[in-house]
Image (spheres, rainbow, N blue to C red):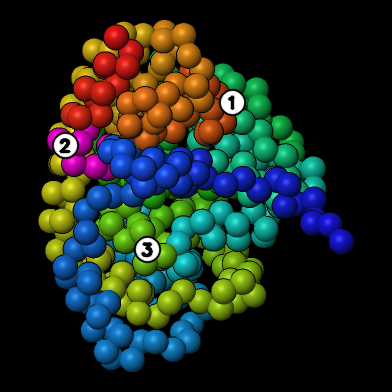
Amino acid sequence: MKLAARIGYLRGEGAFEVLVRARELEAQGRDVVHMEIGEPDFPTPANILAAGQKALADGYTKYGPTQGDPELRQAIAEHVAATRGIPVCESQVVVTPGAKPVLFYSMLALLEPGDEVLYPNPGFPIYESVIGACGAKPVPLPLLESRGFSIDLDRFRDLLSSRTRIVILNSPQNPTGGAIPPEDIRAIAELVRDRDLLVLSDEIYNLMAFDGKPTSIASIEGMSGKTILLDGFSKAYSMTGWRIGYGVFPQWMVDSICLLQVNASSHTASFTQRAAIEALRGPQDSVQIMVEEFRRRRDVIVAGLNAMPGVRCARPGGAFYAFPNIAGTGFSSSELAVRMLQEAGVACLAGSSFGAYGEGYLRFSYATALERIELALDRMHGLLS
């Protein structure tokens, strides 16, 4: 026996591989500043914890609806309508165990061999992984540092073809922290509105923007029916381990998505869904506090990186990632990432782990305490000086 060819398309996430190496150094007595993992360092807010505990006590430990708790789906519909400015019906919402299933289910439902998917590069590595595993062709869409890591619109226009079935957008973005400006979103909408394709808009960092409210392509005229909106609770509500996300789909897709979900996982855990209702309908001050702290950290790390020889760093518009250009150091991204860990005790990721267009960059997650960020900057400056 041998493994199916589709397994060869799947990729892991570099952050977890670097974390293993960092833990090995810590086991040897080394101090390591962890800037590799894309996970908020804030606790899950107390009101959400209490709602989860109450749900367990109230018996939300059994099977539930495949599509999701109706009350949660209504809360999500109201939240999306309020934050994106579009009408959303709860019947369009499917609650999933984490946001990644929305990627898998959407592509399994839509793609055939020979189809093409445009995806941001550098970008979340799971995009390319899932596209290939579903039998389609991944078509990398370059993000330009000169445009704040927005899309190269000319290249986008050239890459669109009669075989393009899905276009993936991510704003604010992992790994660059870049946000697509409203004018670029409108230009993309103009280019795809009359084509036989859907946009999969990954908006997991929607609430974590520093320089104005992000524009969802679903809010552009004629695009709500052509957009799959992906979001979840891991980032803004610091619920990474709760594994709960959701997709808002064109109505005609919902039955097929539910069919995939019932075959894959039956449904999302019942008690986490009750906690998610509290996340959306309860106080939002914890989100605001976290975003303001990330803004403060962003300003510190960007200034510190720009002060290093051979390094320049664009100012990220959202999320909690800095993506400095390190070409001037003379090292490749993988070489410098290894040296950062081994010699400076700073765990970060090579930009090349996010695709070919990430070469020449490093990704730092500033989801760690400010004093640890300052320590990392001192160590890195010493290494490069």
Q: Are marks 3 and 2 in contact (CB under 8 Å)?
A: no
* Cα–Cα span, label 3 and label 2: 23 Å
Give the number of the disc on residue 106: none
CA distance for labels 1 and 2:
31 Å
Residue located 29% across and 21% down the image: 380
Residue bearing the label numbered 2: 370
Looking at the rendered structure, the secondary structure element under dot 2 is helix
Rendered location of residue 328, percent (x, y): 42, 8
Name the residue carrying label 3: 241
Residue 197 image position (x, y, % from top left):
64, 45
Label 3 is placed on what type of residue? Gly
Classify residue 213 by image quadrant. top left
- Residue 240, picture quadrant: bottom left
Residue drawn at (52%, 34%) of the image: 354
What is the tally of numbered marks visible in this picture?
3
Q: Which residue is mark 1?
A: 356
Magenta residues, start to end: 363-373
Dot placed on the residue nearer the N-terminal end, 3 or 2 = 3
Q: Indicate the amino acid at tag 2.
A: Leu
Which of marks 2 and 1 precedes in the sequence?
1
